[in-house]
Amino acid sequence: MATVSHGLVTPIEPGRATRPGALAANAPAPTHAVYANASRRLEAAVASSCGSQHAVNEDAHSPLDGTGRLFVVADGVGGGAMAQTASRLLVAQLHQALEGQPLEGDRVAMAMLAADRTIAEAIARVTDRPGAATVALCAPLDASAARWLVAWVGDCRVYRFSARGAGQLDLLTRDDTFGHLGEAPPPGGSANDPARMVGNGATTGANVAVHGLDRGELLVLCSDGVHKHLDGADWCRLLGAPASLAQRGQALVARARTRGSVDDATVLLLHRSDPGWRGLRGSGRGAAPHDTEGSER
């Protein structure tokens, strides 16, 4: 079974399940898991907290009790209708459409467009106001998790971190902001606002890229409540710290708070290592891994 631990958990919207078979609202979701096969060991950890400006956390993320073939972070767009519903529906719809399927750009784009319609229809049943979410997605493309599909819409981000030397952080996504796209923001808007979202018709699919991940490297998926408030030194110091993966995720969220983040903040960390690697003493990484067939496509 999977190695799991509990910590900062995105609350579930009262009366709504994030996915079929989701944990009850009063049961903590796993925030740490290990997925292993003969070719690789993949460790995942997530930290998420509600910002001071919201009554509930409008971020959402993949549950870590699944197969380890798809990882998603979504951010309900502030100011939109039912932002929490939009982010949770987006995560659930992507898992339903893509889990266990051969992944490539067109399939991901189609899944995003289908989620866009589903979210819009769900919100329209309650209110005339539009709502949407931004998203980042990562999925391993081979059994060893050496190649990854990275997709995004909006300003959720994906980074790759290597602890070699003083640490190297690479941004693998490019924010779909009005400024980056060369578009004029609406009245009262900012060039730094997301121009592409899922749920309000403001997307034609998804940005998709394929990246390599060496053994020992990390992938980081996060909402803007984290990345807007951390600099390169913060990332390298906290990701390279001699702490468990879950502790490093929590430290990133806490650092964003000390740097002034009042938004919902979510970070999902993925660490690729050798199948026999057991990590730091006392970190809880030495328990039996979740035995999967991996993500061979």
Image: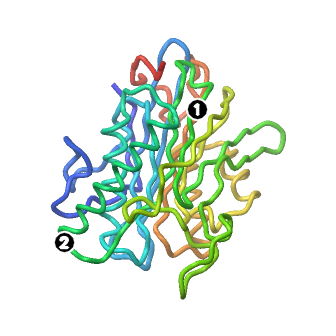
Q: Nearer the viewer, residue 96 or 143?
A: 96
- At x 48%, y 37%, the residue is 106
- At x 54%, y 67%, the residue is 195
Q: CA distance from mark 1 to mark 2?
A: 37 Å
* Above or below: residue 187 compared with residue 26: below
- At x 19%, y 71%, the residue is 126
Residue 148 is tagged as 1
- At x 41%, y 17%, the residue is 293
Here the colouring is: rainbow
Task: Please identify the residue farthest to the left as the structure is shown.
Answer: 15
Q: Name the amino acid, label 2.
A: Val
Task: Please identify the residue farthest to the top as the structure is shown.
Answer: 38
Residue 1 percent across, percent down from the top left: 33, 25
Q: Secondary structure at mark 1?
A: strand
* Above or below: residue 192 compared with residue 199: below
Task: Please identify the residue farthest to the right as the structure is shown.
Answer: 165
